[in-house]
Structure formats: structure tokens, C-alpha cells
Amino acid sequence: MRLGIVVPCYNEEEVLSETAARLLALLDRLIERGIIDAQSRICFVDDGSKDTTWSLIEQLCLESLHVSGLKLSRNRGHQNALLAGLLTVEGDALISIDADLQDDITIIEQMVEQYHKGFDVVYGVRKERTVDTPFKRATAEGFYKLMRLMGVDIVYNHADYRLLSRRALEELRRFKEVNLFLRAMVPLLGFKSTQLYYDRAERFAGESKYPLKKMLSFAWDGITSFSIMPLRFITATGFLIFIATLLMSAWVLGVKLFSDEAVPGWASTVLPIYFIGGIQVFALGIVGEYIGKIYMESKERPRFIIEKKI
């Protein structure tokens, strides 16, 4: 089989040389053993980096026939850069992996074995999160649980380390949405899949490209792109407010008719104004988020623009 490895990169000058060396060594071993074709290659996708990442990719392409590069015209985000590689690189199967060397590349051979067994999708899944801080571990695990609670089909503790067969890639090409969340898009393909578990290492060098702000934004995009549960939550909240209003009205009427403690206009005016006003603002914000996504999808702008290909 001809294998392609897609590596999205954004400001990865500190780690790129080591990443390339390890992946090329792995590729050479698999080629020598006849597991993959000699035309197999690694494609580094530069997502509009501001450092010397693209220069390093160009140098790597000159040094090895097994390395190619894509340069996006500007920064489009990890998911768009990853999709650009998946939809551009040729091969019988493609493996996507981040450039930070935290994912265990030794299971790539096992991924290829699972491909030969007939699996179109092979997920790389973390065994545990011992290298994460307690806060990162709690928020990450909470994210996956929340996504499942919202009805999103997602593989627990899986990021974007996976193998996709050519058949799966061609079907993925048919997904046209602008708001990308590949972790939930791939399970929608429905092809035969399996999971391989590995221990995730600490980042080799450089800084994480997903600080808390980006992580929260990514999680919110995932929820609103693949679940209408927040809209149903608004409906349920509105119904609960209606019931609460009926109960409060009965209480106010009871106090008015059967006691002398009622303060005229207090319960029936002040509390509903603040309560319902807050709910309305919250509901409008969620509805506005969905309208904004419809607006982005309706423009049908390209998800990425390739400036150079080597």
C-alpha cells in the first residue's frame, strides 16, 4: 500500500526537524520490510506560520524524496490545515498526526495492519492523561463527556491521530461544511473502524497551540456544529419557566387572599422581570450562535487556499 502521513504545522520550528527525522526513520523501516510502498511520503502542511516553519519544510523536501509540503496562504486553523492535507495528498490510506511528537508514532505500523484487515478508519486513542495538568485533564475529560451528553458521536480521548482509507477520504470530501470538527465528522462516515491505544508523551519542544481560550472555542464549535441540544435546552427551559410562573402566580394569589403579608407588586413584578430577562438574553445568545454558523455556511467560501505545493 502507498501510505501518506499528514502533519499540520503552525510555528513548529523548534520541533519540526526532530519530527521529520523520527517519521522518516519509521517510514524507511516500513518500506524496507515491504509493509508499505516506496512511494509513501510525509506531507507537512504549513498553516500560515510566522516563524521559519516553511523554510524548514522546503529544506526537508530537498533532502528527502519522501517529504512533500503544502503552504496555506494564511492561518486557517488546525482543522482546516489538516483537511487541506487529507484532501490533497495521494495514497491508499492517510494518517494524520500532530507535529509536537506527543502521539506515539510506533503504532503507525499497527494502523497499517488494521487497514489490511479491512478497517477503513483506525483511531489512535490515549490510554490515560497522566502527562496533563489536573486542570487540563478535568476539562478534556469533561469535554468528551459533554459532547456525548449532547448526542455527538465522538471517540472518547481521541484527538486527530487516525488512519483513513482512500474510500473514507473520498466520502469525507463530500462534507462541505465550513465549521469543521473532524473528530465528529469522521464517525459519521460509518465505515468499519477500530481503536488502538497508546501512551501520550510530553511535548518535545515549543508551546501548545491550544491554550484555554482556543480549547473553549473549539469545544463550543464542536457542540454547536453537531448538536441541536442547546436549542432543545432553550425549549425545555421555557417550559420550566412557564410551570414556575404558574406556581408563583398561585403562591402570590394565596398570599393575597389568605394573609396580610403581601407587599403590593413585589412578587408579581420584580422577580419575573429579572428572571425572564436573563433567560431571554441567554436564549438569544445561543440562537444567535446557530444563526452565525448558518451565515458562515451560506457564503460557501473556500475552507483553505493553497499558496505553494512542493
Image: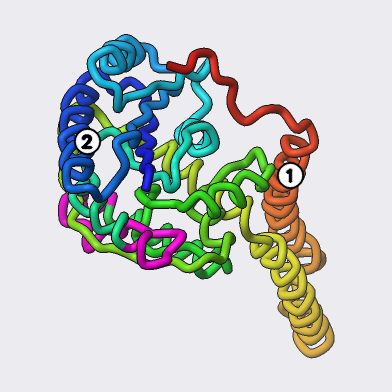
Report whether residue 93 is seen: yes
Say if mark 2 contacts mark 1, CB within 8 Å: no
Image: 195 above or below 69: below
Q: At numbered mark 2, what does the secondary structure look like: helix, strand or loop?
A: helix
Image: 195 above or below 250: above
Q: Answer with the quarter of the image where residue 255 lies.
A: bottom right
Q: Which disc, if any, is residue 42? A: none
Looking at the picture, how far across and down is residue 44, in whole percent? 36, 27
Q: Residue at point 18% right, 56% down?
A: 199
Specify whether 93 is left or right of 15. Answer: right
Front in this rendered view, residue 202 or 113 = 113
* Quadrant housing the C terminus: top left
Specify whether 218 is left or right of 53. Answer: right
Dot 2 amino acid type: Leu
Q: Which residue is mark 2?
A: 23
Q: Answer with the quarter of the image where residue 234 lies.
A: bottom right
Q: Which residue is mark 1?
A: 288
Q: Which residues are magenta?
A: 114-136
Dot 1 amino acid type: Gly
Q: Residue at point 51% right, 49% down?
A: 166
Comes first in the chain, label 2 or label 1: 2
Q: Is residue 118 magenta?
A: yes
Image: 52 above or below 151: above
Q: At numbered mark 1, what does the secondary structure look like: helix, strand or loop?
A: helix
Inter-mark Cα distance, 2 to 1: 44 Å
Q: Answer with the quarter of the image where residue 18 lies.
A: top left
Looking at the picture, how far across and down is residue 110, in whole percent? 25, 58
Front in this rendered view, residue 254 or 195 = 195
Label 2 Cα crowd, 10 Å radius (few <14 / some 14-19 / many 20+): some
Specify whether 300 is left or right of 46. Answer: right
Q: Is residue 109 magenta?
A: no
Report whether residue 220 is seen: no
